[in-house]
Amino acid sequence: MRNFSAYIFDLDGVLCHTDQFHFAAWAMLAKRLEIPFDASVNDRLRGVSRMESLDIVLGEKKNAYTTEQKKAFAEEKNAIYRGYLQTMTPADLDEDVRSTLLKLRADGHKLAVGSSSKNAPLILECIGLGSFFDAVADGTQIAHSKPDPEVFLLAAKLLDVKPDDALVVEDAEAGIQAAKAGGFYAAGIGPAADSTRADFRLQKLSDLLKAPV
Ligand code: G6P
Ligand code: MG
C-alpha cells in the first residue's frame, strides 16, 4: 500500500462496534410501532444518517407519519441507543485498532474521523479517543450524509490535506462510494472488505501497516 499523508477513519464498524446497539434500539422502536425489523434491515442502515435510517426502518409506512412524529421516533431511538453507548469504555477499543492508530501517529501521519453519526464525540470519549484525533468530522457538521462525500471533504479540509493524499477506511458501501466521489483512496473493512469500488481490502485495521507507510 502506498504512503498516505492522512488517514480518515469511519467510526461505527471501523474503530468500534456499535452495530448491535443500533440494532437493539431500532428493534425496540420497530416493535412498539409493530413494524417488522431484522438484521437484514439493520445491515442497510450502515453509514446512513439517523433520519434516512428511520425511513428505511419504517419501510412502506414511511409516509404514514408526520414530520413531528418521525422526529420523535428518531429521538426515542437515539435515547435508547445513547443508553447503550454509555456502557462502552476504553476496554471496548480493540487492541488491533489501538496499536494501529498509535503506530500511524508515531510515523507522523495525520489522523481524522469521518462519521455520519451525531454521537461520534460521545462514542470517542467513551472508548478513550476523545482527544486523540487531529480532526473529527461528524454528523453534526454536515448537511449531506454518505454516499455524499461532504463528511470526508470536511475532514480533509480540517487536516489541510488533499483528498488524493488521504486514505478513507470504511465498513459501509455508502462510505466507500462517498470516499471515491470525493477523490479519496478507499479501503474497505468488515462488510466492505469485498467492495469492488474499494482501492484496498483489509481483514483487520493493522493491514494498513503491512507495507511501508
Ligand atoms: C453511522 C452508522 C449508521 C447511523 C449513523 C447515524 O454512520 O453506521 O448506522 O445511522 O451513523 O448515527 P447517529 O448516532 O447520528 O444516530
Ligand atoms: Mg461505519
Image: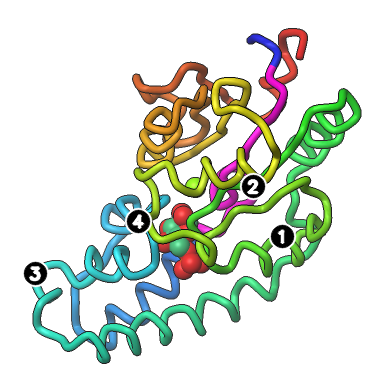
Q: Is residue 68 left or right of residue 80?
A: left
Please state the horizontal and vertical placement of residue 205, each as a whole percent of the image: 66, 30
Find out if the beta carbon at label 4 lies less than 8 Å from the nearest ligand 1 atom. Answer: yes
- In the image, the segment drawn in magenta is 4-19
Task: Using the image, tell me which numbered label, if any, was put on residue 60.
Answer: 3
Q: Is residue 3 left or right of residue 11?
A: right
Residue 101 quadrant: top right
Find out if the beta carbon at label 3 lies less than 8 Å from the nearest ligand 1 atom. Answer: no
Disc 1, disc 2: CB below 8 Å? yes
Measured along the vertical axis of the image, is residue 97 above or below residue 127?
A: above
For label 4, the residue is 45
Residue 49 quadrant: bottom left
Quadrant of the image for the C terminus?
A: top right
Mark toward the start of the polypeptide (1 vs 4): 4
Measured along the vertical axis of the image, is residue 93 above or below residue 157?
A: below
Mark toward the start of the polypeptide (1 vs 2): 2
Give the residue type at disc 2: Val
For label 2, the residue is 113
Front-lying residue, 14 or 109? 109
How packed mark 1 is, by other alpha carbons closer than 10 Å (few <14, some 14-19, many 20 or more), is many
Residue 21 in view here: no
Please state the horizontal and vertical placement of residue 24, each as a whole percent of the image: 44, 71
Give the residue type at disc 1: Leu
Please state the horizontal and vertical placement of residue 118, each as a whole percent of the image: 53, 67
